[in-house]
Image (cartoon, rainbow, N blue to C red):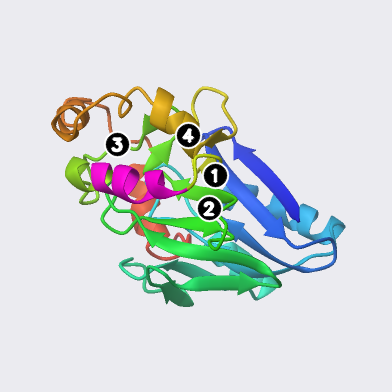
Amino acid sequence: MLFRQFFDTNSSTYTYLIASGKGREALIIDPVKEQVPQYLVAIEQLELRLVRAIDTHTHADHVTGLGDLRDATGCATMMGEFTKAECVSQSVREGELIDVDGIKLGALYTPGHTDESFSFVLNPQAPYAVFTGDVLLIRGTGRTDFQNGDPEKSWDSIVNKLFRLPDETLVYPAHDYKGWTVSTIGEEKRFNPRIAGKTRAQYVEIMRNLHLPDPRLMDVAIPANLACGKTR
């Protein structure tokens, strides 16, 4: 398997490029508009053909690269079925399998950070990794105070869905602010300070009292992302 992890310093966003091998079809998860030229260089140098570009949710801190990648490569753009972004080529339901040249992603509905967030499990028959978007971060969880976020749903998505994956499943989030690149489900069960040893009520109380400022680009990013990154 060919796997590349990209990082956008302005928004601390991780983007993942995956293919079964050099010269094969590929997919990309959570692309950032400003980084599209870098992705295209990697795609060209690895002789890949990008066929799917996926967003885990409507991001509020950066503009998506979905539309630019579709223009440049002809790839299909995808989000979960509850997205309000009518510009995507295809929406996916929970349990649906995305198969790109042998790379299999299982769609998992994981609301909480937003009401339309999905995670994607790599090789769902024997989970190898999960791309969690913002619902589960490394030693943290995504905020729940805008875009119809809900701490109760966040708890359910993490504890009753993601934490049911095998402990050795790798966790690849859409963001990290501390320099971590990967975790595992087992690590997050044991060491995530918002969840480990906490009750549901304690978690909800924590999330309702974060009092974080709005993302700097939120007023620009959300409407742009509902148009697949096309800004006027």
Q: Which residue is mark 3?
A: 143
Considering the numbered disc 2 on the image, is that residue within a helix, a strand or a loop?
Answer: loop
Whether pointer 3 and pointer 4 mark residues with C-beta atoms closer than 8 Å, the reply is: no
From the image, state whether disc 4 or disc 2 is nearer to you: 4
Q: Which mark is residue 145?
A: none
Q: Which residue is mark 1?
A: 169
Residue type of the residue flagged with mark 1: Thr
Give how far across and how far down residue 27 sits, in percent.
64, 63
Give how far across and how far down residue 170 sits, in percent.
57, 42
What's the distance in space between the residues labelled 3 and 4, CA to CA?
A: 22 Å
Residue type of the residue flagged with mark 4: Gly
What's the distance in space between the residues labelled 3 and 1, CA to CA?
A: 23 Å
Within-10-Å neighbours for mark 3: few <14, some 14–19, many 20+ = many
Give how far across and how far down residue 174 sits, in percent.
49, 43
Quadrant location of the N terminus in the rendered image: bottom right
Q: Which residue is mark 4?
A: 186
Dot 3 or dot 2: first in sequence order is 2
What's the distance in space between the residues labelled 4 and 2, CA to CA?
A: 24 Å
Residue type of the residue flagged with mark 2: Asp
Q: How many marks?
A: 4
From the image, state whether disc 3 or disc 4 is nearer to you: 4
* Secondary structure, magenta segment, majority class: helix
Q: Which mark is residue 30?
A: 2
Considering the numbered disc 1 on the image, is that residue within a helix, a strand or a loop?
Answer: loop
**Which residue: 26% across, 27% down?**
212
Dot 2 or dot 1: first in sequence order is 2
Considering the numbered disc 3 on the image, is that residue within a helix, a strand or a loop?
Answer: loop
Boundaries of the magenta span:
155-165
Within-10-Å neighbours for mark 1: few <14, some 14–19, many 20+ = many
What's the distance in space between the residues labelled 3 and 2, CA to CA?
A: 18 Å
